Amino acid sequence: MKPLKSIMKSQDKRNVKIKPCEECGKNNEHYDLYIDGEFKTRIGSDICFSCQMKKEDEQIRREARESRINARIAKAKNYSVIPFELEGVSFQDYKPENQTQKDAYDLSVKFAKGEMDRTTLFFQGDTGLGKSHLSYCIHQHYINDRKASIFIDLPSLLSEIRSTYGNKNDWRARTQDDIMNALKEADLLVLDDIGAEYVKPDANGYESWAADILFQIANSRQGKKNIYTTNFTSRDLTKKYGMMSKRIISRLMNNSKVIKVEGKDHRLKGLE
């Protein structure tokens, strides 16, 4: 066995090499370590210390960005209400039975892919024609693209808001402001079944509270991506929301593509 001093002496042989950093091209030192004349390992990196630090900083920023995206998606999911019959459906599951349904399908796919210059799709038609189905598919496409999307029908949303009114003394409970801010901040809002809600009418026979909430939502979503669906005509909505109806419809329709879907209720097949 060699004496310790002899071993340490043999290990002290290092060849200093200078080569350009693979990132910035500046001179970068590394050492080849030899023991008893035999190459053992390289000490150093193919990139310089400064570039290593930049890479580590970029990694930290990427992870922080991913964390923020994950938090936004999770928050939006927490405010969504998905009907059980829609869970898991896809564009491939939608079977158009006439030209209006084929057009609705084609426009939905284009909107999901970001190939339309309109910010809003407005589906109008009777129940059971696939308006919610297509809307959910767009919603899911956004989530798959790592974007925050909320899907909720208006009756459920108003019920959720109403439930917050008894929580004023509980700081942990969700508030109306929490809900409204979540709707405002989402990358996509799908508001399903507009007009299907029932709220006690005011003295003039109009649902003023629901109208006010709907106006606030539509107003906060200007310039953002939205999908609205309704079984009602514009005349029906005017009758329902009274004096606020013009402002509501104006906000809902701004920069929108109206898609009128016609046909027979898909859910009633076999009952004819």
Image (cartoon, rainbow, N blue to C red):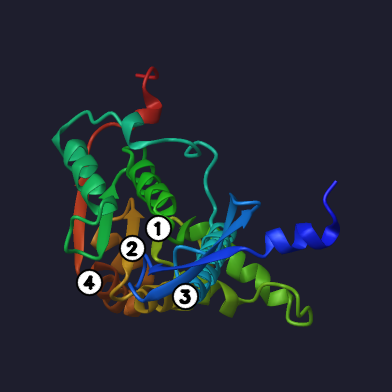
User: What amino acid is at disc 3?
Assistant: Lys
State how far apart marks 2 and 1 are (Cα). Answer: 6 Å
The answer to which of 78 and 176 lies nearer the viewer is 78
Tell how many labels.
Answer: 4
- Callouts 2 and 1 close, C-beta under 8 Å: yes
Q: Label 2, on which residue?
A: 226
The residue tagged 4 is 254
The tag earlier along the polypeptide, 2 or 3, is 3
Q: Which residue is mark 3?
A: 54
* Element marked by disc 1: strand
Q: Amino acid at mark 4?
A: Asn
Q: Residues within 10 Å of mark 1 (few under 14, many from 20)?
A: many
Alpha-carbon span between mark 4 and mark 1: 15 Å
Report the Cα–Cα distance between label 3 and label 1: 40 Å
Q: Are marks 4 and 1 in contact (CB under 8 Å)?
A: no
- Viewer-proximal residue among 118 and 71: 71
User: Mark 4 to mark 2: distance in Å?
Assistant: 11 Å
Residue 134, labelled with which disc?
Answer: none
Question: Badge 2: how crowded within 10 Å, few (<14), some, or many (20+)?
Answer: many
Residue 207 shows in this picture = no
Is mark 3 in CB contact (under 8 Å) with mark 4? no
Q: Which amino acid lies under the numbered mark 2 shown in the image of this protein?
A: Asn
Q: Nearer the viewer, residue 261 or 9?
A: 9
Query: Where residue 157 sits in the image (x, y, percent)?
Result: 53, 63
Q: Who comes first in sequence, dot 3 or dot 1?
A: 3
Residue that numbered label 1 is attached to = 190
First in sequence: mark 3 or mark 4?
3
